[in-house]
Amino acid sequence: MSAKTKMREILKNRLLCQDKFTNDIENLVSNNNEMNYIEAICHYCEENSIEIESVSKLITKPMKEKLKGNAMNLNYLKRTSRAKFLAI
């Protein structure tokens, strides 16, 4: 591994970027069966002294879909059907 690659890895681990945030949340959810994505994000913010409002930019589109699924299961959002029917 070159010095440039090592420096990028060090910076990536220290700074909160979308990839690191997503990986950390996915790890929290996969390692804690009783924790959903909403709880994982809240827990992560609390543990790292991050304001919950500031992580909206770090949430990827796939994670937004998972959050939406969690919210619908918890009745925080109304269930909607976005299925498209194809006419044959």
Image (tube, grey):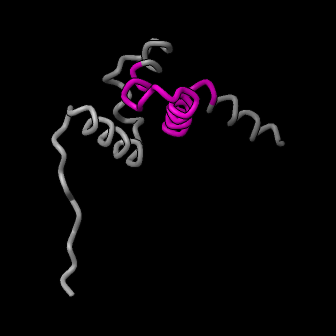
In percent of width and height, residue 12 lies at 62, 32
Q: Residue at x 21, y 87 (%)?
A: 88
Residue 38: say if magenta. yes
Instruction: Pick whichever, 13 or 62, lies toward us.
Output: 62
Residue 6: say if magenta. no
Q: Residue at x 31, y 23 (%)?
A: 53
Q: Residue at x 35, y 25 (%)?
A: 54
- In the figure, is residue 25 to the left or right of 85? right
User: Where on the picture, by quarter, is residue 6?
Assistant: top right
Q: Residue at x 49, y 13 (%)?
A: 47
- Looking at the image, residue 33 lies above or below residue 5: above
**Residue range of the region highlighted in magenta in the rendering:** 13-42
Judged by its main secondary structure, the magenta piece is helix
In percent of width and height, residue 16 lies at 52, 28
In percent of width and height, residue 85 lies at 20, 73
Q: Is residue 17 visible?
A: no
User: Where on the picture, by quarter, is residue 67?
Assistant: top left
Q: Is residue 65 visible?
A: yes
- Looking at the image, residue 57 lies above or below residue 46: below
- Looking at the image, residue 84 lies above or below residue 44: below
